[in-house]
Image (tube, rainbow, N blue to C red):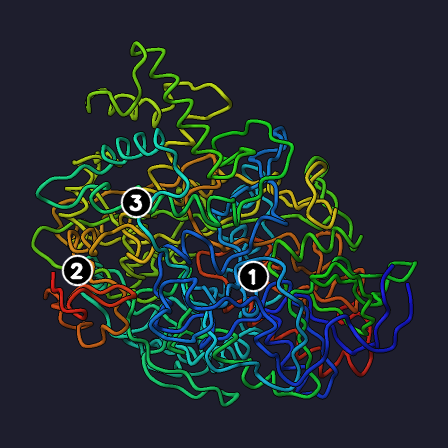
Amino acid sequence: MSTKLKPVDVVLVGFGWTGAIMGQQFCDAGLEVMAFERGPWRDTPSDFATGFAQDELRYMWRHHLFQNLTYDTLTIRNKVSEEALPMRRLGSFLLGTGVGSGGVHWNGQIWRFLPTDFLTKSHNEKRYGKKAVTDGDLTVQDWGITYDELEPYYDQFDRLCGTSGKAGNLNGKIQPGGNPFEGPRSAEYPTPAMKQTYGPTLFGKAAAELGRHPFPHPTGNLSRAYTNSLGAQLGACTYCGFCEKFACGNYSKASPQTTVLPYLLRKQNFTLKTECEVLKVELTPDKKRATGVTYVNSAGEEFFQPAEMVILSAFVLHNARLLLLSGIGEPYDPQTGTGVVGKNYAYQTMSSVNVFFDDKIINPFIGAGALATVIDDFNGDNFDHGGLGFIGGAYIAGMITGGRPIEMIYTPEGTPNWGLQWKHAAAKNYLRSFSLSVHGSSMSSRGNYLSLDPTYRDVHGRPMLRMTFDFSANDLKMSDYLTDRASEVARAMNPREIKANRRSRPWGVTPYQTTHNTGGAIMGTNPTDSVVNKYLQVWDVPNVFSMGSGAFPQNAGYNPTATVAALAYHSAHEILTRYLKQPGPLVQA
Amino acid sequence: MTDAPDDSGSPVRASVDLSRRRLLLAGAAGIATSAGAAIVIHDGELGGPSQTIRGEMPWTPGGADSPPGVSGSDYKYFKPAEVAFIEAAVGRLIPEDDVGPGAVQAGVPFFLDRQLDGRYGRGDHFYLGGPWPKGTPQQGYQSRFNPAQFYRAAIEAIDKYVAAHFSGSSFAKLEPEEQDKLLKGFESNQLELEEGVDAKMFFDMLLQNTKEGYFSDPIYGGNKDMSAWKMIGFPGAHYDYLEWVERHGERVPYPTVGFKGRPGWYGVEK
């Protein structure tokens, strides 16, 4: 029995980056917006003040800011023939929760995808043939949107965050010092690139000597103070080395808290309910329209919140599950390849190369979430894949996000994990080593998908999400090739030695890799092979919009957040300018 | 479905009164004692009251989600036989010598005791619901036990194994070389234990927790005098390195600090 509440114009399900962006856009247009977040309220001075924010044990290893799995997790397996078991502890990816969610504990790495990344199928097929995009059961698709369409919204996100960086392509003109491979930008970054510490500087020099094109990593860890488009003020980053998995106490990392909330929460037409979990999107009997959402508060009481529009703005895995639980769209079937919800779950193919010096003090504790010098020469289709046997690529970054000693002590090849030999290696190498990150794409394939688990249920009695995933042959080939390219740069830095940490099958729940999960509610040009159109509007239920990286038909070799934000702004623009005048499908199927 | 035109089960208010949240007095949490009446908020716990926030940024002066530091020096969770095992085992995982402290000297056994006695030991942030079939290595931790239960069961199973194979002895009484051999056997999944204990799973947890105690802030009971940080050159939880960003290759001369400062602040420079 649920209590029916007063209707609102818009319900937001989940309140991280996309919830904050959509809430701000809708409230500015005068709509009555109600946001639900199942985690707690969080603000900078109370929850992650500088006096205690730099706590590796509590945040990284005790998961203080992450989703508490006690009441809800997902089940995992590598292939359909296996029994999925619950992920009993977070590891490979670190799900957010609470107001701001992953936007609180991200690194602030702000990337745009390449123009060809949006044309994964058609571009690669044209250049390398049909086999290149179908071999090994690849199921890559075009996005149904182009870089040029998204560019103004990427720019909007940059201006929200105050992104620090150096443009490499301004309106088609290549700029010295930036990334020459990037799509044309309409404007320079709002703030200059961060200053680089020793490790990234050595990487940049070595890469340039090899003929690569190094540039500073674009970042939401700000190089200087900035007042954003909503009047929120951010401070300059102090390189404390606690970004990823941590929250910034210094207002230097772009997050919903630092960029949107001070503006949005003062709006009289905006309401936020925390520790309230949406259980289901309710539909009309013909399943063509959402009537609102059912949610439960922490006392266990159920309510029905009627709404004209429902925005799924939770994390990719939660959005996909909510679609499946609500009976929206046809679930994907990997045997037949039919159905769409849950299809094309993809990830990120990460590897790294550790570099050890005898004569150079690197000081790895001087770090920031996106403090890096990067080369993009081998990302996307920036290089000729002819004869290589794979599509996709990665950026390679000489990156120092910090030197947190439980997580980030590198020891040379052959060092045991414990005992005196380990301790001596830790003492000898900590100050004199760092890591190159190889941040690879993840092409979707037929057997990787999301569905509901037949056995395990959450605290509310709902089936958990089930993830079936393993790395594809395409992606492992890509990762090996890219790890070799990273090793070349590593050796060109003249270290004592290097250690390549290659990616191999099968995917496992430990150790940490990245929280760049994608797919499951993918976008496209027609309802037979996608869940949402290019405005993130659900084909089958046009007053439901599904935000986030769930819309990616496959994942590119970049961090997803800027693309997630740009897609949200693009969607909001179309809703405000077209949908509100005439609610209904924005693209005719 | 019943009709109730207004409320949602949580009062609508201009801003949230933080005192409605789960609050503890500072004295319970070590770290904040010197701050007098500061308030500690534990947001990581589930089931805090639902809030409705409208029209204002909710904020109350004096509230802080301070870290849950530990106090005392006695063992609260480990029984004497378990203490013997833990001191012997972590002493092999990180032995003492001139280069730096061993795990025992750094206080890791005490750290582990407080972790297992607290929220981590109770399985906070773990999903422990059934059924519990044995999984693949890729599926990670698969057990009905929370960490506190798992340590207890594993230590008992290991000592049983040692008693059976070393004429009634216990792990702690073995020679260091024999202890290392056993630990390697657990690590490489070569040795099987009884009582539903996956030896490798336990080894991985013990090694991880040992490094956590060795390298975490001293408020959690390990890393005594920040000795493990000093050994590797990590200067602790400094807030601002701006001055050193472009001074490439220089040693940063900052003294090592933890959340409670450093001994020098209390007149005991180390």
Amino acid type at mark 1: Thr
Report whether A514 appears left or right of B109.
right
Name which residue type carries label 3: Lys
Between label 2 and label 3, give the one nearer the viewer: 3
Q: From what the image shows, is residue A246 above or below residue A33?
A: above
According to the picture, the residue beneath numbered tag 3 turns out to be B211
Q: Residue at (29%, 69%) from the top-left corner?
A: A240
**Is B248 placed left or right of B1 in the picture?**
left
Crowd class of label 3 (few under 14; some 14 to 19; many from 20; radius 10 Å): many
Residue at 83% across / 61% down in the picture? A282
Picture coordinates of residue A308 (x, y %)?
81, 74
Q: Do tags 2 and 3 sit on the same chain?
A: no
Determine the chain carrying the residue at label 3.
B
How far across and down, in percent of the image, does residue B192 sit? Answer: 42, 18
| Residue nearer the viewer, A132 or A177 | A177
**Could you give the CA–CA distance between mark 3 and mark 1, rounded to whole angstroms?**
27 Å
Residue tagged 2: A362
Q: Which residue is mark 1?
A: A97
Q: Position of residue A215 (x, y in %)?
A: 29, 68
* Residue A152 left/right relative to A195: right
Specify few, some or many for label 2: CA neighbours under 10 Å numbering under 14, 14-19, or 20 or more. Answer: many
Residue A544 sits in which quadrant? bottom right
| Crowd band around label 1 with a 10 angstrom C-alpha radius: few (<14), some (14–19), many (20+) | many
Q: Chain of mark 1?
A: A
